[in-house]
Amino acid sequence: MAKLAVFGKMLVRRRMLDTSEEESRFARCLTTLDLIALGVGATLGAGVYVLAGEVAREKAGPAIVLSFLIAALSSVLAGLCYAEFGARVPKTGSAYLYSYVTVGEIWAFITGWNLILSYVIGTASVARAWSSTFDNLVEQKISTFFNESMSIPDTGKVLAKYPDLFALILILLLTGLLAFGVSESALVNKIFTVINLVVLGFVIISGFVKGDTANWKLTLEDIENNRSALVPKDVNFGTGGFAPFGFSGILSGAATCFYAFVGFDCIATTSEEAKNPQRSIPIGIVASLLICFVAYFGVSAALTLMMPYYILDTKSPLPEAFKYVHWGPARYIVAVGSLCALSTSLLGSMFPMPRVIFAMAEDGLLFRFLSRMHKKTKTPVLATIVSGVVAALMAFLFDLDALVDLMSIGTLLAYTLVAVCVLILRYQPGSLSSSTDKNMVELERLTDKDPMTDGDSGDENGQALEKKPLRSTFSPQLLLLPSSPSPTKTSGLIVYATTAITCVLFTLLCIVLAVWGPGVINGQPVLVTLVVILIVLSFICVLIIWRQPQSKENISFKVPLLPTLPLVSIFVNIYLMMQLDGATWIRFTVWMVIGGAKQRKASGKRTYRVFVPGFAPLGRIVVSCLSSSLTRAMTAQRESDTVNLRLILVSGKTQDFTFSPNDSATDIARHVFETWPAGWEEEQVSSPSILRLIFQGRFLHGNVTLGALKLPPGRTTVMHLVARETLPEPNSHGQRNREKTTESSCCLLL
């Protein structure tokens, strides 16, 4: 049973959050305006110049403005969840980190791994779109040249028709810009974003000046009288009017328009580069979504006012619309705006990519060399270069059309997990962002046994902590009648489990609606009964969550209307994921298998992870190299490949471990904490980050490896295991330049 308990804890292992006042390794130079410009630039891409024509002509007609409104409201739900986490967790990593500190390492890795794929594909596809747009401006001279001189044989839509050298150079240039410094990148982004907004303002004003409201009142007779090559007879253009395709067309258009608001999440990766992240990130996310909605709404309204929706060009609607109202030269202004929009969108895809890679590498889930920082520019230079080169090669050689839907899985999965994390955290005891006695805190494990008391994290007015029982005995009545007005471990566990069940029910419901939707609409008894059962069970779960006490922690931003808004966001995201085809899910599975292999190599001899791929939480098996069986296996290797350590505690207890020479002091502290021997509970500390080693009278810090100490092979080296609390020690200039080790009764001491 003891081994089973240890295994269970490994499955729900979460990252400990450092809330000390240590300076970030990044350069804190981004203002709120920089973050708004970054979010607008990443979100308001070339889609604003193309998407409106396609959706208006084929799905919604002039009611596309309502489609954008519904899509914006759905995106705001995810944006609010990101905003709350930005206020809670001011650390680099975005949805990856949010998942790690809340629902565990397996979901964190899945999220981060798929975000990386989304950013790489997004970068490569936007670069190719930039190249194609510029090629259209010069009348296809670039594509003609490369097709004639460097064409690639047909490979079944795996490789592109010709190597896109233009896209390759563009990505490499922006990679150099990002590696050079974040402030320079932010300046370039602001310039292009301003130009883009000016052009869109021109489009909107022009549309309202040259538009005709009669185009919103077309009749079916008008459509039939204008049949031509542009309006073929075998194509259905609805019944005319403001919403020619009805309410179903508006919803179908909203599902497409939802992806136009993807990109704001890049703001969440700037937590360690923003001057005031807990204030700037929520403002940046909400403001950028609002600006983007106004732009999409205005452009789609102007476009459908300038010309009838059924003759809109689906590839270049704005130039054709200006040509229709006899403003042909305006196409060049639109082209400039389109290139600027593509540039900011490209920068928005490339900016967060190395930061997610950096966060994963720093945690040991990817190769650790990717977490190296440039001392002068304070950017993750190796992660930036590696990710940029990979994206550049994909844009140079590959046909990305079949991979674009994989971006949707990564983004929607991240949105879903962030909403789940917000929902769980708001009902947990304790806090991620504050601690009463420790600098290092961890989200309370719901399976821990601790006789200590716990309390509410403080009410809105910052009153003193109110002591509450940490764990009460579970009884069915607690599902609807909680025993305390403040969260306890039992109420937190109820919300945790109920949220997981709700996600499963939502997934099953969305699968039924996506696969057998027509049958449900037609009233087939079996399908309708199944849908009703799933809805009733989901409602019961929502009711249980709603009845549990919420944390009163005072943070700078909170998602309103819990639990409704996060649950609606979860349902919308899962439903959109279920709309993707089977081929996309097969590619997703292959990508997860690759991720499991890569992550195992990155972990080296420290941990071995086997991932069962797929969307559902099928599981993760973690076998620690600190377990006795693996230790015995490692001792059979060459003596030079292992280091034997005997750690001594203040109580006199000792424990032998076997490590690799590549393991650092931080690695050792983490392993010891994760595999704390039975019987040491009275000396347990809250985080591996405050465990340190002392060897030959000096502390071993951070990345100091055992190999660097030149320990004698084949012998057991004795080190003392201590806990260190870091306090600021100001110098003559009032700045912190060294650390002071203090003793604390709640930690392990020599």
Image (cartoon, rainbow, N blue to C red):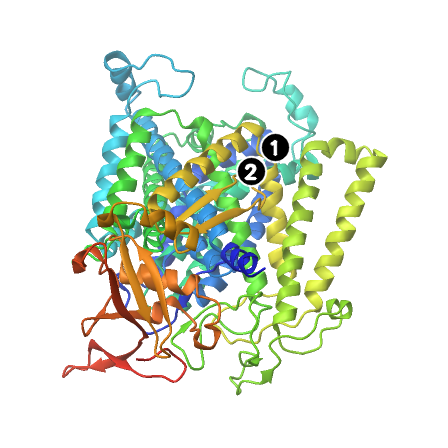
In the rendered image, residue 219, in percent from the top left (x then y), is placed at 68, 30
Q: Earlier in the sequence, mark 1 or mark 2?
A: 1
Quarter of the C terminus within the rendering: bottom left
Task: State whether residue 533 is above or below residue 221.
Answer: below
Q: Are marks 1 and 2 in contact (CB under 8 Å)?
A: yes
- Residue found 26% across the figure and 41% down from its top: 386
**Residue 256: mark:** 2
Mark 1, other Cα within 10 Å: few <14 / some 14–19 / many ≥20: many
In the figure, residue 15 lies in which quadrant?
bottom left
- Amino acid type assigned to the residue bearing label 1 in the image: Lys
Horizontal side of 635 relative to 13 (left or right) equals: left
- Residue found 22% across the figure and 61% down from its top: 704
- Amino acid type assigned to the residue bearing label 2 in the image: Thr
Seen from the viewer's position, the closer of residues 558 and 68 is 558
Between label 1 and label 2, give the one nearer the viewer. Answer: 2
Task: State whether residue 271 is above or below residue 257.
Answer: below
In the rendered image, residue 671, in percent from the top left (x then y), is placed at 38, 60
Horizontal side of 205 relative to 428 (left or right) equals: left
| Residue 194 seen in the current view | no
Q: Which residue is the site of mark 1? A: 59
Task: State whether residue 14 is above or below residue 323.
Answer: below
